[in-house]
Image (cartoon, coloured by chain):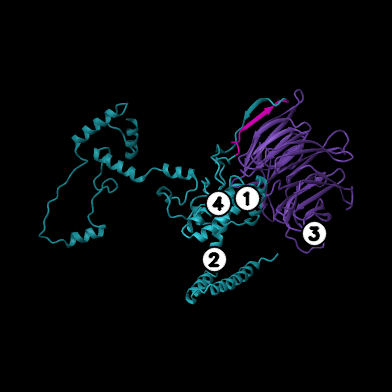
Amino acid sequence: MYHKEKSIQIKNSASALYNNLGVLRIAPRSLTYFTVVHANVVNMVSASWDGLNYSHRQLQSKEPNVATSTSLIMQAAFCALPSRDLLVVTSQKGIQMYESDGSTMVYWHALDTPDTPTDQAVFARGISAVGKSDSSGSILVFDVPSKGSNITLSDVLKGHKKSITDIASECSGSQDCIADLISADDGGNLCVWKSGEEFQRFNNIPGFDISCTSVKLWKGTAVAGYGTGQIRLYEAVTGILHAEVNAHARWIYSLDIAPFSGLLLSAAEDSLVRVWHLSIKPESLSVEVAHLHNECVTDTQICGAKFCDGDGYAFAVTGYDLSEIIRYSQS
Amino acid sequence: MSSRTLPLLFINLGGEMLYILDQRLRAQNIPADKAKKVMNDIISTMFNKNMDKLYDLMTMAFKYQVLLCPRPKDILLVSFNHMDAIKEFVKDIPCILTLVDETYQQLIQIYTNLSSGEFQLIRQTLLIFFQDMHIRVSIFLKDKVQNSNGRFVLPTSGPVPYGTQVPGLIRMFNCTGKEVSRLQFSNGGNYNTAIREGSFEIFGDRVTKLGTNMYSVSRPVETLMSGTSTNSAQHAKVNMAPNPLAKEELNLLARLMGGLEVQKPGNADNGFRVNLFATDEEEEEAFISRPDELSYGVIKIQATQDQQASAELAKIMGEFSESGDQSPIVSSKGDDLLAMMDGL
């Protein structure tokens, strides 16, 4: 179903972090941007679709006006907003936002670090087009104007007791500003939020003390990957379990959905990337999962996997200690 | 950041450590010659040309253990394995044993209640420390747990971690929570169900072999060929290889039973002869230097050429096989005997 394409070499190897691959497709310029985190550096590659041009850039996690920083980056991801795209980088010290090509930092938000050291690790992790979250279990919602750097923190949502691992969002309804948000934490709990004047917590899907490391929202279905290697599909607004898959033999590190085709990508520490198909059955309002394909990246613990386009025609994979982005496309 | 900092860090921290040690040795009135020996030993170890090798061995071993832990929480079991070994080293010295026990208590207190997500964060932080280290360690290469490019082998087979199911099942439910269908898919590996969980108490079976002494002298004989075996699949692989000695013994038995293969005289491969000396050369020398007056008669015992006996034996063997072959054709004598024995 898929075959391997030429890999893209990156300057550093990927660190073992959840969802450690960012992909942004720039159709007007026939380019795709990729981001891979290595300790305190984000490696960015801009790859032309003809495979002839690659340009590299590195972004460091640092506070403005501070010469050096040893802050480790937890996640880097692209946010496709209605009017612009941003690259968001979350680290131990705070949240940075850049223009999507990484050229300029447009915003910096420092996390509240307590004066006396506590047992709790302090970091920010979990990025989606609407908000970012931190280790205390709070989701920070930022208002982003269509141009410029006048970004403001507009809301702090508290709903989790454990550190948040991932957030996902989807525009629901006919109005393009209404979004559903789903957040996942280290205890496996999922919180569903609806936006409006303010964000409101709509539903809470309890976990089983197993970390949910990656979550996606598609047509009102929450798709969640867990440390037990399971994938679960829930109806977001009601919390009804549609399907449970014993998908992987180790911790799932990344999930992605190609929204136009309903293809699901899952990747784990067990060296396997699996492609599934989700379909919604209108008569029973249930969601079905079918397994389509496996790819094994030998001797590699995979930490990031993303589709490169909305149909799922191609996908890219990163692994711990690997200095390349491996690509596959449909045969 | 500078890549030239580590040697300076090492030397200066080491220097400070030596000041403190020197002060402690004097404060406790340790005899001067003994104190000097201690200091000399430590200094020669610090600047030993093999220190970097020691560091490489240590780090690659722990990287291997962290990477291969089935669950992040198993890092604690690896730590307990190390602690158990340290305790064994000092088991006869009560005051040090107390210190070790106190450390156990602290480990248990701090780590046993952490969640799986917090352990995974610890593991991810450790993996950042070990990132890009691919030094080849001969014991790992021999055991085939490391490839020649320095990367560790991550098998897609074996038991799944405790708490994980073998991949392959999709279950779908209706709105009332009732399971409505089950599908199987091919998981691309060769997994089996999890083994029991190790103990997180001060005493207990840790179950995992990660963190145990891979240089240990007391290893079972079968694993000597392959070095340490932390993997039962490895054990099985060694045991299934046919024992060459057994095969040769059966070959000899086949030859003695008579005429299963025509022996060309002078064919050194098929015959054997007894040499009472250590080497052929010694035998030759002894023959040359042997005094003439000692004569001896040579009796030739033909164990193979007795046609009547071999025909008799062949007939008996023929009765054993089902198809009643009179003279079984043998390509590899040992194998056929084995096959015959199985057929009995």
Pair 2/1: label in front = 1
Label located before the other in sequence (2 or 1) = 2
Q: Which chain is purple?
A: A
Pair 3/4: label in front = 4
Q: Amino acid at mark 1?
A: Tyr
Q: Are dots 2 and 4 in contact, CB under 8 Å?
A: no
| Callout 2: SS | helix
| Chain letter belonging to callout 1 | B
Labelled disc at residue A226:
none
Q: Which residues are magenta?
A: B163-175
Front residue of B161 and B335: B161
Q: Amino acid at mark 2?
A: Met
To which residue does mark 3 refer?
A: A63
Task: Name the image quarter holding the N terminus of chain A.
Answer: top right
To which residue does mark 1 refer?
A: B111
Q: Which chain is cyan?
A: B
Q: Residues within 10 Å of mark 3 (few under 14, many from 20)?
A: some
User: How far across and how far down the image is residue A109, in percent?
Assistant: 82, 54
Task: Say if labels 3 and 2 share a chain.
Answer: no
To which residue does mark 4 refer?
A: B80
B234 to A173, vertically: above or below? below
Q: CA distance from mark 2 to mark 4?
A: 26 Å
